[in-house]
Every structure is written in structure tokens, then in C-alpha cells.
Image: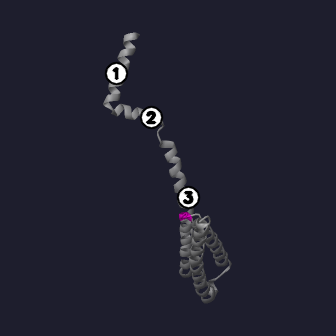
Amino acid sequence: MAGHAAKKAKAREESTGGTWDMVLMAVNLVYILLRVVWQWSSFDRWALAGYLFLLAVSFACKAMLVMAAGAASYGEYFLDVLVLALVVQVGSIYSDGFWYLLLLVPAFVAYQAARKMLDWVFTPTEAEVQEEEDEDDPAAQKRARRHENKMRKYA
């Protein structure tokens, strides 16, 4: 019983790794056959650099997904980037315009950073929230009037 959780984690890692290995091999085989072999005349060093970049991103994200599966986590951002890289890789067989899809990653990061910054700037403090609640609460208004009357009485 002691190693039961570790065995489950290992099984999840192997299952996830095997699934994504097959997907990556299939996509890379299709890319090599169609883009490199069949369209060799348009395959220049920029296309090679892009292919190597996508290959590195794909395998790094797959490794992180396997580690996340072992930790019983989902690893959603790694999955998103991996799927985006595979879509760009398959799409770039047809058109180099698919490379622009990779701009979604920095756009998403900028959106998340701006959202966090705006939430930080425009989030009211506890005192402001309490003050707003007191303004809307009739009982709190009554307590404030009583307090003011007491202060006038003793002043």
C-alpha cells in the first residue's frame, strides 16, 4: 500500500508520455514528408530554423505535461502551447502565415499581466469596502448617528 500513489503517478506519466509521443511522431512525420521532401524547393534555412524551434517547444511542453500528469495536475498552459505549436507546424505545410498564430502566446501573457495589474490598481482596500457596506446598511447608519449624538452630548 505504501507505494500505491507512486505507482499510479508512474502509470499516468507513462500513459501521457506514450500518447503524446505518438502524436508528435505522426505530426513530425507528416511535416517531414510534405514540407521537407515534397516542397523541398521552398524549404530554406528559415523554415529549418522554424521547424527546429517548434520541435524544441513541442518536446519541452510534452516533458512538462508528463511531469504534470505524474503530479496529478493538468498542466493546461503547457497543453495549450503544445497544441498551438502542433497546429502551427501542420498549418505551415500549407502556408507560412500560420507562424503568426505563435503571436497568441505573448498576446496572452500581456493580457494576463495587464489584467493582474488592473485588478491590483482598482481593487478597493478593506476599509473602502467596509465604508461602502456601512453606507448601504441602515443599521450601520443608525449606529453612526447614535455615535455622533453621544459625541455631541459629551463634548
Query: Within 10 Å of the Cα at label 1, are there few (<14), some (14-19), or many (20+) other Cα atoms?
Result: few
Which mark is in front, 1 or 2? 1
Quadrant into which the N terminus falls: bottom right
Which mark is in front, 3 or 1? 1
Q: Is residue 69 toward the left or the right of residue 139 in the image?
A: right
Q: Position of residue 107 (x, y in %)?
A: 54, 60
Question: Can residue 97 be spotted in the picture?
Answer: no
For residue 109, the mark is 3
Q: Position of residue 47 (x, y in %)?
A: 64, 78
The residue that label 2 is drawn on is: 128
Distance between the alpha carbons at the discs numbered 3 and 1: 50 Å
First in residue order: circle 2 vs circle 3: 3
Please check the rendered image and state whether residue 152 is part of the magenta-colored stretch, yes or no.
no
Query: For residue 32, which quarter of the picture?
Result: bottom right
Q: How is the image coloured?
A: one colour
Query: For residue 7, which quarter of the picture?
Result: bottom right
The residue that label 1 is drawn on is: 145
For badge 2, the amino acid type reads Glu
Q: Nearer the viewer, residue 152 or 30?
A: 152
First in residue order: circle 1 vs circle 2: 2
